[in-house]
Image (cartoon, rainbow, N blue to C red):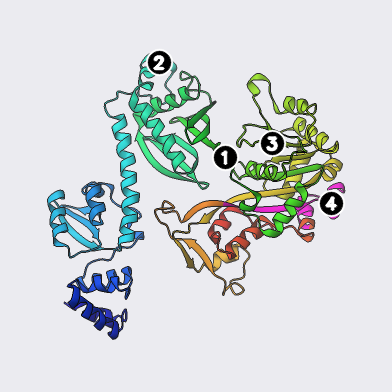
């Protein structure tokens, strides 16, 4: 077998001089050569591990190899032992257990593994950081699955069948199950883990043979656990009880709310239940009511766009519209704007459904359709409340738009949102609702479309070269951007192996300059409006995304997914 020092020299991982120094140090302290080289900073962990892999003729295991492992293999080694000795079982095969270790020559650990597992240990080598990250991720998932199993053990659930009628369900038995500690514990576990994991939504959906739980984190759904399908009725019904819904009604959609309070935070949960062919599905929207921490400076505005936005939110009257799909951060942006312009001289009033963020010294009204407190009735009452600036949660219909325009025409500054794909199509949507062209063009000061995109995780950020197809999809000439640096996330424990952590916003600002107003007044279509807007300086969502690609904030693939080419 080739000596480690000779192998490292041959591979040009160290110099002859460094090797001699390391050998002298080894004689002094009696440690192995690899340990000396690491301690003296003469070589990095991965280079050493790859060299030992070649020396001993054993496989080198990378982080990618440990993204998905055999869950049954994982169970062979107790978590405390795996953490203590930095080893992980990742596969098994007829009496053989494949284990990745930092030190594949540690005979004592290998012997103990054989005693603990009663399996023949097939040794592989890896880097300690990679192994520890995989340990953290997989044992955490294993613990969550164990908690589900423990919570549901010993319970006899009401099993529903497809197309079951109400008479097929023993409501009294179901009510008894809902009060059982295991079901309460499991539902609490699902919600509390979602809050800790920065989730914005929880999806609890029936499959043919299981109940799947997924969290939406940074805008993307991630599978976190499954429960036996026989527990579906009890789990969904427990959520109904918490949100004050009818547990006997399983044929119609229902909506409710849960308020969760702890010493350090308050979370408002919006619950939606809908019947599917495989059973009822629940979606829980988590609205964290802790202190509002967003400002216009940390939302993701480029400096030129922030200057434009600030100019229009400081106007004395008119209308500022933020558009985009559900969950794109419209409310967050408008609340950050209110926070910036708030002062002692102005009376600021909001009408929202629901109030997502509570701001001090701003009067916020929560719509409650069930008692007749609608957007329309609230806004008419606010007219008599001497307002200076008004936030209308959403323009939903002609009644809401009429009142919003009256506010803007009578010396008030109005902030509102609208569901539309981009800034030019927002004007089309206003016209579709029934707003006359002469009002849509004259009352509106600024239309801003936005999208949320996932930011690259700082813990695993790496340079890469995107494919020419990706660049051409972004209308970026591969030759022109040959010298540009592109980044992506490799995947690590911090980002749950997604490569993304957190989100930032892309903005498209359409200022109502005279040429733009003229297109609206003259009956121009959406394409005419877009062309004129670009001629007057509008940066599209796709172009805003390219800016963030080039400054290393987001990946090219993410911008391709979230924006479209409008040229």
Which numbered disc, 1 or 4, marks the residue that appears first in the sequence? 1
Q: Cα distance, mark 4 to mark 2?
A: 62 Å
On the image, which quarter does residue 545 sit in? bottom right
Viewer-nearest of labels 2 and 1? 1
Percent from the top left, x then y, of residue 80? 24, 48
Quadrant of the image containing the C terminus: bottom right
Q: Is residue 507 magenta?
A: yes
At a point 74% along the width and 50% down the height, the residue shown is 424
| Highlighted range, magenta | 504-531
Q: Cα distance, mark 1 to mark 3?
A: 23 Å
Which numbered disc, 1 or 3, marks the residue that appears first in the sequence? 1
Which numbered disc, 2 or 3, marks the residue that appears first in the sequence? 2
Whether residue 274 is visible here, answered yes or no, is no
Taking depth in this image into account, of 9 and 71 the one nearest to the observer is 9
Quadrant of the image containing the N terminus: bottom left
Residue at label 2? 171
Assess whether mark 4 and mark 3 are in contact (beta carbons under 8 angstroms).
no
At a point 33% along the width and 54% down the height, the residue shown is 134
Residue at label 3? 394
Q: In the rendered view, would you say 377 is above or below 521?
A: above
On the image, which quarter does residue 317 sit in? top right
Residue at label 4? 519
Q: Is residue 116 magenta?
A: no
At a point 85% along the width and 36% down the height, the residue shown is 410
Whether residue 547 is visible here, answered yes or no, is yes
Residue at label 1? 291
């Amino acid at each position: 077998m080739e000596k480690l020092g000779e192998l490292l020299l041959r591979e040009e991982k160290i110099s002859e001089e460094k090797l001699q120094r390391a050998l002298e140090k080894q004689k002094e302290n009696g440690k192995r050569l690899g340990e000396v080289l690491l301690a003296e900073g003469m070589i990095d962990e991965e280079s050493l591990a790859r060299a030992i892999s070649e020396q001993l003729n054993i496989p080198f295991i990378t982080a990618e190899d440990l993204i998905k492992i055999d869950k049954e293999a994982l169970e062979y080694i107790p978590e405390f032992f795996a953490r203590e000795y930095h080893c992980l079982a990742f596969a098994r095969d007829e009496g053989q257990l494949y284990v990745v270790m930092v030190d594949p020559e540690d005979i004592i650990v290998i012997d103990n593994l054989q005693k603990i597992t009663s399996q023949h240990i097939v040794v592989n080598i890896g880097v300690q950081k990679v192994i520890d990250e995989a340990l953290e991720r997989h044992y955490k998932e294993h613990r969550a699955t164990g908690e589900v199993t423990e919570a549901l053990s010993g319970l006899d659930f009401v099993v529903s069948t497809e197309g079951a009628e109400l008479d097929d369900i023993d409501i009294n038995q179901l009510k008894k199950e809902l009060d059982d500690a295991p079901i309460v514990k499991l539902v609490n576990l699902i919600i509390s883990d979602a809050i800790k994991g920065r989730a914005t939504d929880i999806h609890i959906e029936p499959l043919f043979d299981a109940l799947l739980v997924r969290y939406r984190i940074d805008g993307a759904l991630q599978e976190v656990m499954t429960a036996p399908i026989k527990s579906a009725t009890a789990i969904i019904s427990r959520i109904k009880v918490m949100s004050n819904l009818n547990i006997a009604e399983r044929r119609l959609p229902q909506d409710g709310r849960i308020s969760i309070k702890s010493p350090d935070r308050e979370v408002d949960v919006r619950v939606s239940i809908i019947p599917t062919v495989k059973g009822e599905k629940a979606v829980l929207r988590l609205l964290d009511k802790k202190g509002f921490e967003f400002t216009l400076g940390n939302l993701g505005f480029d400096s030129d766009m922030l200057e434009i936005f600030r100019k229009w939110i400081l106007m004395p009257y008119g209308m500022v519209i933020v558009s985009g799909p559900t969950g794109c951060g419209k409310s967050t942006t408008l609340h950050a704007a209110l926070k910036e312009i708030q002062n002692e001289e102005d009376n600021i009033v909001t009408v929202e459904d629901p109030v997502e963020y509570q701001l001090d010294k701003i009067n916020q009204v929560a719509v409650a359709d069930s008692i007749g407190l609608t957007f329309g009735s609230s806004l008419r009452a606010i007219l008599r409340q001497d307002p200076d600036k008004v936030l209308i949660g959403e323009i939903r219909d002609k009644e809401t738009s009429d009142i919003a325009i009256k506010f803007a025409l009578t010396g008030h500054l109005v902030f509102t949102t609208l569901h539309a794909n981009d800034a030019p199509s927002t004007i089309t949507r206003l016209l579709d609702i029934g707003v006359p062209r002469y009002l849509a063009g004259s009352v509106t000061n600024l239309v801003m479309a936005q999208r949320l995109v996932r930011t690259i995780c700082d813990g695993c950020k790496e340079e890469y070269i995107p494919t020419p197809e990706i660049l051409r999809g972004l209308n970026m000439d591969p030759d022109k951007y040959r010298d540009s640096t592109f980044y992506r996330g490799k995947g690590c424990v911090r980002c749950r192996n997604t490569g993304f952590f957190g989100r930032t916003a892309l903005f498209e600002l359409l200022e109502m300059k005279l040429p733009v107003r003229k297109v609206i007044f003259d009956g121009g279509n959406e394409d005419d409006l877009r062309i004129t807007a670009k001629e007057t300086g509008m940066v599209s969502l796709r172009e805003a995304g390219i800016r963030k690609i080039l400054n290393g904030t987001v990946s090219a693939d993410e911008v391709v997914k979230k924006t479209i080419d409008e040229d």
